[in-house]
């Protein structure tokens, strides 16, 4: 049962503060952010993923335990804004050239680390959970998808960011995450709508690749355009403003196509790199996005995700099914990826195949994003969403042990920031 807001207001009045009902979202954000930052930092001090602490903070202050804050439409709106900037930054730090150059080997690892475990997990979920077909599929999808957030951190920690192995791993997880979003749309939309969306995606990707090719042929002209625009508008930060407007526009296009806006944010970030907008502008924008994400948007999003968890909605026999899905996701996925790495990629790898397999076993933010989108659209209910969150917590704690001993890298080489 939620703690009465009037009681909280009384406590704040003692401190000389007054909570005004129309602006209660400010109070909710304050409580969630403070709890997420505090507990997330505590987990990092013990070398544990901060995402685990941030989600747990939401569970502690949410309806499952203390009931200080409950998820409502205002909170979900703020969460959507946070998610937009998180996904945009992930795309911003990637390069289409990297994905294209490693397409074949990366696709192979996507099959072993994602698609095969997904197929097995869907069968297990249909058998073990009393959900409908759609909800069972989405729960399996959210738990099975590797997450570029935690994997990018591991790649950085292993000092692989600029190596062939690192590029293969990041390309693979990028392919897997894009496939996961497309699969999600195919599951939650009617067949006719799905076929239309697939054709629209095909056209969009084709136009995207042409635009990316054109921009990369004439990067100097584009940089000069940004410089001239900055002088005209008398804004040094015009590049940042321009990119945000473009990202929002692409997100609206994807939303109008019946896709999630997060795909649009990812594609908008993907097309931008330092060679296109200039190293100085890229570094400044990347640092700004990284700082805002790390200290505000990321802890806020995962704290809000924790609020949605309803432990009371999970029956005891659900935990048996959850255990089976986790074993398939990590056991089967890691084993197959290890075998594929050892047999086909041994001449291309800079680290042991078991470490490649362990890194690609990383699950985290993307699964929660998929579950959040599905939950907001009513495709999964509280029990399914809560199972995904619990699975993410467990697997986030397991991955550092599966990946093995980490080779510490120089801090300056960690260009991709920790997003989970």
Image (spheres, helix red, strand yellow):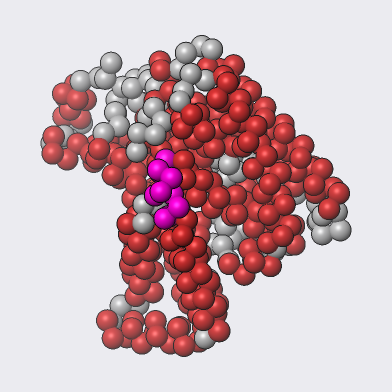
Residue 14 percent across, percent down from the top left: 18, 27
Residue 253 appears in which quarter of the rendering?
bottom left
Q: Is residue 192 left or right of residue 47?
A: left
Residue 298 percent across, percent down from the top left: 44, 46
Q: Is residue 117 left or right of residue 262?
A: right
Residue 289 appears in which quarter of the rendering?
bottom left
Is residue 260 something that shows in the picture?
no
Residue closer to the observer: 377 or 268: 377
Residue 398 percent across, percent down from the top left: 65, 32
The residue drawn where x is 19% and y is 36% is: 24
Counting every numbered tag in the picture gives 0
Q: Is residue 16 left or right of residue 211?
A: left
Residue closer to the observer: 253 or 72: 253
The residue drawn where x is 51% and y is 56% is: 90
The residue drawn where x is 36% and y is 52% is: 258
* Quarter of the image that includes the N terminus: top left
Is residue 309 something that shows in the picture?
yes
Q: Is residue 258 left or right of residue 151?
A: left
Magenta stretch prevailing secondary structure:
helix
Residue that lies at the very extreme toward the front in this rendered image? 192
Residue closer to the observer: 160 or 296: 160
264 falls in the magenta region: no
Residue that lies at the very extreme toward the top in this rendered image? 316
Residue 88 percent across, percent down from the top left: 44, 58
The residue drawn where x is 54% and y is 53% is: 178
Q: Which residues are magenta?
A: 188-197
* Image position of 107 with respect to 144: above or below: below
Residue closer to the observer: 241 or 18: 241
């Amino acid at each position: 049962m939620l703690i009465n807001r009037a009681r909280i207001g009384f406590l704040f009045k003692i401190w000389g503060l007054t909570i005004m009902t129309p602006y209660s979202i400010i109070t909710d954000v304050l409580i969630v952010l403070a709890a997420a930052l505090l507990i997330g930092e505590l987990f990092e001090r013990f070398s544990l993923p901060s995402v685990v602490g941030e989600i747990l903070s939401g569970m502690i202050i949410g309806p499952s335990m203390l009931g200080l804050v409950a998820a409502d439409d205002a909170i979900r709106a703020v969460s959507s804004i946070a998610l937009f900037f998180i996904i945009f930054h992930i795309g911003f730090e990637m390069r289409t050239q990297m994905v294209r150059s490693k397409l074949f080997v990366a696709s192979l690892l996507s099959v072993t680390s994602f698609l095969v475990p997904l197929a097995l997990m869907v069968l297990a979920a249909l058998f073990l959970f009393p959900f409908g077909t759609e909800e069972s599929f989405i729960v399996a999808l959210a738990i099975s998808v590797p997450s570029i957030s935690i994997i990018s951190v591991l790649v950085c920690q292993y000092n692989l960011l600029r190596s062939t192995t690192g590029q293969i791993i990041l390309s693979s997880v990028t392919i897997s995450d894009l496939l996961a979003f497309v699969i999600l749309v195919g599951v939650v939309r009617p067949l006719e709508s799905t076929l239309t969306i697939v054709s629209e995606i095909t056209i969009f990707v084709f136009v995207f690749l042409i635009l990316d090719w054109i921009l990369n042929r004439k990067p100097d002209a584009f940089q000069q355009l940004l410089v001239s625009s900055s002088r005209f508008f008398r804004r040094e930060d015009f590049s940042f403003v321009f990119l945000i407007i473009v990202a929002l526009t692409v997100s609206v296009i994807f939303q109008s196509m019946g896709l999630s806006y997060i795909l649009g944010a990812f594609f908008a970030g993907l097309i931008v790199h330092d060679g296109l907008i200039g190293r100085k502008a890229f570094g400044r924008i990347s640092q700004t996005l990284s700082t805002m994400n790390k200290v505000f948007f990321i802890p806020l999003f995962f704290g809000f995700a924790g609020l949605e968890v309803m432990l009371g909605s999970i029956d005891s026999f659900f935990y048996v099914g959850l255990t089976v899905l986790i074993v398939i996701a990590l056991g089967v996925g890691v084993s197959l990826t290890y075998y594929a790495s050892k047999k086909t990629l041994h001449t291309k790898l800079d680290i042991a195949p078991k470490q490649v397999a362990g890194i690609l076993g990383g699950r985290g933010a993307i699964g929660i994003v998929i579950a959040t989108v599905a939950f907001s659209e009513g495709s999964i209910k509280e029990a399914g969403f809560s199972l995904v969150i619990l699975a993410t917590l467990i697997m986030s704690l397991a991955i550092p042990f599966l990946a093995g001993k980490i080779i510490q890298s120089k801090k300056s080489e960690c260009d991709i920031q920790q997003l989970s």
